[in-house]
Image (cartoon, coloured by chain):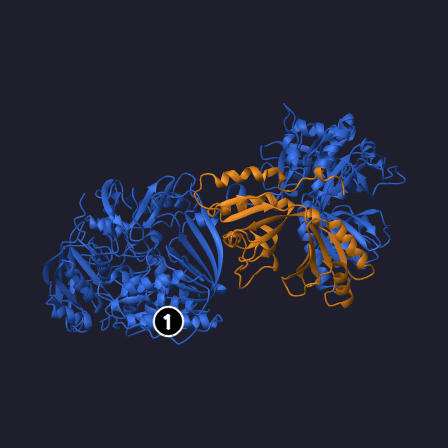
Amino acid sequence: MAQTFRLPEGGQIDRAQSLGFSFDGGRYRGYGGDSLASALLANGIHFVGRSFKYHRPRGIFAAGFEEPNALVQLGEDPRTDPNQLATLVELVEGLAARSQNRWPSLDYDIGALNNLASRAFPSGFYYKTFMWPATMWMKYEHFIRHAAGMGQSPRERDPDRYDKTQAHCDVLVVGAGPAGLAAALAAARSGARVVLAEQDHLLGGALLGEAEATIGGAPALDWARAAEAELRSLPEVRVLGRTTVYGYFDHNFLTLIEKVTDHLNRKPEHLPRHRLWKLRAKQVVLATGSIERPLVFRDNDRPGIMLAGACRTYVNRYAVKPGTTAVVFTNNDSAYGAALDMQAAGIEIAAIVDLRREVIGPMSEAAEAAGLPILADHAIVATEGGRRIKRVRAAPMDPSGGQVYVSGEPIDCDLLAVSGGWSPTLHLHSQAKGEIAWNEELGCFVPGEARQAAHSAGACNAAFGLASCLAEGATAGQKAAAAAGFKAKGRKKAAPKAADHGFLPARWLWLVPSDTPLGHGGKHFHELQNDVTAADLQLALREGYRSIEHVKRYTTTGMGTDQGKTSNVNAIGIVAEATGRAVPEVGVTTFRPPFTPVTFGVFAGRDVDELLDPVRRTPMHGWHQQAGALFEDVGQWRRAWYYPRAGEDMHAAVTREVREVRRSLGIMDASTLGKIDIQGSDASELLNRIYTNAWKKLEVGRCRYGLMLGEDGMVMDDGVTARLGENHYLMTTTTGNAAPVLAHLEEYIQTEWPEFDVYCTSVTEQFATISIAGPNARRLLAELTSDIELSPNDFPHMAVRDGTVAGVPARVFRVSFTGEAAYEINVPSSFGLAVWQATMTAGEKYGITPYGTEAMHVLRAEKGFIIVGQETDGSINPIDLGMDWIVSKKKDFVGKRSLTRSDMAKPDRKQLVGILTDDPAVVLPEGAHLVERVEPQPPMAMLGHVSSSYYSPNVGRSIALALVKGGLAKKGQKLTAPLLDGRKIGCTVVDPVFFDPEGDRLRG
Amino acid sequence: MADSFLRHSPLAHLGLAGRAGAFEAGTAIEAGVTMGERPYRGLVNLRGPAGDKAFADAVQKALGAALPVEPNTTTGKGDVAVFWLGPDEWWVVTPSDGPATADKLRAALAGQKAAVTDVSESRTCIHIRGAQARDLLAKGCPLDLHPRVFAAGQCAQSLCAKAMITLHQVANDDAEDGKDGGPAYDVYVLNSFAEYLWLWLEDAAREYGLRITSQ
C-alpha cells in the first residue's frame, strides 16, 4: 500500500530501507527511522485503539514517551509485549502490532456500549459498585480485568535473554537534546567520565522535530551531529542510545534500561534483548526537556486530535503529513510554529483558534504575516467525527473569559493540532526528592532546589529558548564536572548563537468553556489513558475529596501506564480552579519510578535457571552423582540425600543405609560442616564465654561438644570443637550456621572483647571431610593409615590426631553423630575425591555403604541427638532440650543472664521428648500436632508438635522426637496426633534416646 | 605433599578445555575476554596488629615483602604477593606453596600476637583478561574498576554475582600481561562457588566472545 501521507522528501528517515509491517492484520510499509506511529500516520491511520473505560475510538496523540493513547501489543506469544507506545517503537521489517482495549475488533467493539451508558460510570464507580459483598470481589475483578484489557502478557516462558550491569561515572547527562549535548560536551572536555543517556536512537532531542532552528548560523542538527561525533571520539565518554533513565534513587544511584536488540531485524544470538544499568554517578545533569499539554475542551479525544508539537515532529522528523486540512487550537505562541511547518509541508491550515485575546509572539506574528487565518479570543466548543475528526466548532469567548454563549461556526478538518502550554519533565528531579515550584507566568511546575548532586538544564528547567538551553546545558555540564573534581581546560568556549524564544505569551485557562454545561452533550477529557474527565474531578471534589493525592486515586487520573505525563498539570489546574485555591496550594502528586514502563525480564537478568542461585558442591560431588545419589538442598549446599539402588524407593534405600551403618560400615560426605580455626592466647577464654560449658581444662588433642546460645538464652548452634594446641582450636558448626557463627564470634571479639588476643578464620572449604562410622570403622581406618595409633586407649572417643590417610596429610577426629564408633577424616580439599575413592576401595570387604543426610538423620534420632533448626527454632533453650547437664553453673557465658530468668525453667515450656506410636508401623508426619483430648473438630488445645519422625530399622519400629508442653513430666502419658487426613494416631511420651542408651557402641 | 595426580581442582570436572569451542564456534566476533582456571595457588591468611613494628618486621623478614597497610593494595617480592584484606588481615599469595609459606610465617611469628592459617585448599582462582574483561566484571561486581580508581596491584574483597570474591588486578591495559589489549585480573573464589561463578561469567561473556585457556 502506498504511503499516501509521506512527504516526497526530507525527514530523518532512510527511504532506501523500505520496511513491511502489519497492524491489526493489515499490511503496510514504512521506512527505516520511522516509529510505528509515524509509519501508521504515513499510511493514513490515526485510529489505533479504544479508551480504557468508555472504549471510545482513540488516535495517535503525541510523538514521544508522553503518548497516552497509542498503546499496542507487539509480536506473538512467547515474544509478545503489551502496552508498547507506538510512538517509541522503532519500525523493523516484519513488525506485527495489534490494537488493545477492543473486542472483538477495533471497528466493532462491544465495550463501546460503556460510552452510551457513561452516566452509569462516574468517578469512583468501581469503589461504589463493587464494594459488597466482599466475597464477590474475585468475580468482579475478573470482569473488570477483562473489560479493561490492558493487553496480554505472554503465556509461555520468555525466550529472550536479559542482562544487568553496573557502572560508575563522574557526570551522567540524561537526555541528548541541545541542553544535554551541551552539558555532555562541557563535562567531557574537562576529562570527566561522562555517560550520556538518550531514550531515542537519534541524538538531538527537540531539534529532530524542528525545521528552521539554527545554531551558530548552521542547521541545528548539524551542530548536534558534530557534538555527537566529538563525544563518541572521547575515550571517557559513553553514549547510550535507546536507553531510558527510569529511576533516580538515593546517593545518586540511577537505573537505566537499554533496548539492545529490539530495533534489529535479525537479533544476534550473543546479545541480550535489554540491559539494566545500575549506575552510580557523582553528579547528574538532567536535560530531560518538556512535555506539551493538551487543552481540556469538549470531546477533545477523537482520532485526528494531536499535540501541535507532535504534528510538527511528524512533518519535520518523519516527513509525514498527519492530515490534509488542519485546525490549530492554542493558548500560546508555540503552536504557530507548528502551523507554519505544516503549511510548508502542504497541509491546509483552515484556522488557528487562539484562546488569547491578542495574537502576539514571534511565531504568531510570523503566521499572521504569512496570511494564516487566525481566530483570536476564540474557543473550540465542540468536535465531530467518529473514527476521525471531521469538523470543529469555534466560538468567540465571552469577555469574562469563562463562558461561551454562541454555538460558533463549523470548520471542516481532518486534523486538530492542540497546544495548552509546556511542562518541564520533572520526573527524575522529583524522584530524587528535589523541590518543585510553581511558575505563574509560564503556567507550569519548575524544579526547585535539588536534594542530590543534580543540575537541571534546558527545557526541564523552564529554559524554553534554544540559546538558553545551550547556555544552561554548558554551565550545568561544567559545574557538574567541577564538582566531580574536573576543572574546564583552556578558555571557556562561548555558547554558539541561536534564537531564544519560548512559547510565551500565553493565556492559562484550565478548562475551556463550551456552549453547554460541563458534562452535558460531550466530555471534557483531561486524562486520555484512564478516561478521566473534568466533570469526574469536580464530582470527586463535591464528594469531599480535597487532597490531590486522594482525588487522583478516586478518579484514577494519572494512574495509567503513562502516569499522567500529559494530564497531571491540567488536573491540578482544574482542581485548583474548582476549589478556589492557587495551584501551589493544591500541590503535585508524587513522581515514582519507573519513568516509562520497564520489561520484567531485566530485573531477573541472567540470574535464571542454573544461575538463579549458587549451588555449592563438595569436592566429592561428582562421585555422589555417579553413584546415583539424590540430593537435598541445605542452604546453598547440595548434599547427597540417599543412594537408591535399582528398584529401591526412598524408604528402602534409607532403611538399608541405616541398617548397614550399624551392622558394619558406612561412609558419608561431611565436608559442608562449618569449620573455624581459632588461634591466640585468649582462644580458650573465647570458647569459655561463647559456649555454655567449660573449656579451659580440655586437653590438647581432645574434643568437646558445645552448645552456643544467643543473647536471648535460646540455642543458636552446636558442634564439636577440638583443641589442636595450647592456643589453637578448631571449631565445627552446623552446615547452615557456618557463616552466622563466624559473624557471632567476630561481633563479640570486635565489640565486647577487643582486648582479646584471638583470631578466627573460616577453614570450612580448606578440608574435605569423610566420615566413616560403624563397628568396622576402626578396622578400615587402620588399613588406610600407618602413622596414627588407633587403639581406644591411644585414640579414644572425642580425640583428634594428625597423620596420613591414604597417603595424604590428614586430621582425624574421633567423634560420632550416629552413636557408632566413627572417624571424621579431614584432608586437603583437592585430595578429597582421591581419599574418598581409596576409602571406598579399602572398605569393599566390609560392604562399606555410602549414606546420605536422610540416613544420618535417622541414625542420630535413634540416639536422641538434636539437630539445631529441627529440634530448635529460636525459642528453645538447653533446659527445654533436657541438656542442662552441659550448662555451667560456675562461669558466665553469652545468654546466661537470659537463661537464668525464672521463666526459662518453667515446667510448662515445650520440652524435648521421644514419641512412640501405638502402632509401630505408623510414621507420624513431621509437624503433626499432639493433643491430650481430641475434639470432634479444631480448635483443640495443642501441646506441641513432632519435630523429627522416621522409621528406624535398628529399633524395629517408628520413632519420633517432639516438643511438648511440660513433656519431661509427661513420660509414659498417652497423647494423640490428629492428622489432616482425619486419622487420629495414638502415641506415648517416652525418653528421646531409642538406641544404645549406654553408649557402648561409640566407645568400642 | 602427596602425589599431585591425585588432586582435583574445583573446576576440573567442567573440562574447561573442551568448553572453549562452544563459545568460539559460530560467533563472528573476536574474543574480547579470555578466561582460565589457575588452581592450587598458595594462599595463607595472616592476622596480626599492623601497627606493631615487631610483627611487621618479622613478616617482612620472612617474605622479603613489606606488609601493605594502605587499604586494597598489594606488595610483592618475586613470586610472593601480599594482599591487604583488612586492618589486621592479609593474604600471602604464592604460585603453589601454601603450606611451606605458612610454616615459614609461623616460625617467624612464634610467640607474637598473630595467626597464620593456610587456606590454599579453600579457593581456586579464575584468571580473566582481555579488552572487555572490565565490562565483564562490571556485570557482577559493584566496585568501580575504572583505571583511575582500581589499577594493577590493587585488590579487594567483593561480590561477583552471588559469590564472594577476592579480586586482584594483575596487569593494566597497557602492560604486557594484559595480552589482549585489556586489563588482567585474578578472581579468587571459594571452591564450592567456583562452578557457579565460572558458569555465570561464561554466560556474561557471551556477548564479548570468550576464549578459554588452560591457564
Color used for chain A?
blue
Q: Nearer the viewer, residue A669 or A236?
A: A236
The residue lying furthest to the bottom in this view is A491
Asked whether residue A588 is in view, the answer is yes
Q: Answer whether residue A878 is visible to the viewer in this image.
A: no
Q: Is residue A594 left or right of A845 when viewed as pictured?
A: left
Please provide percent x and percent y for residue A426.
37, 65
Residue pushed farthest right? A793
Residue where numbered disc 1 is placed: A474
Residue at (68% x, 65% y) in the render? B69
Q: Residue furthest front?
A: B176
Q: Is A454 left or right of A913, judged from the image as shown?
A: left
Q: Between residue A943 and residue A43, name the one nearer to us.
A: A43
Whole-percent x, y for residue B104 in the image: 78, 55
Mark 1 lies on a secondary structure that is: helix
Label 1: few (<14), some or many (≥20) within 10 Å? many
Q: Report which quarter residue A159 is drawn in.
A: top left
Image vertical order of residue A888 relative to residue A580, above or below = above
Q: Is residue A985 above or below residue A393?
A: above
- Give A207 or A983, whichever is nearer the viewer: A207
Seen in the image, is A467 located left or right of residue A839? left
Q: What residue type is labelled 1?
A: Ala
Q: Quadrant of the C terminus of chain A?
A: top right
Please identify the quadrant where the N terminus of chain A is shown.
top left
Q: Where is residue A101 in the image (x, y as percent from the top left)?
A: 29, 46
Q: Mark 1 lies on which chain?
A: A
Q: In which quarter of the image is residue A490?
A: bottom left
**Left or right of A543 in this view: A705:** right
User: Residue A817: x percent and y percent?
Assistant: 76, 39
Q: Which chain is in orange here?
A: B
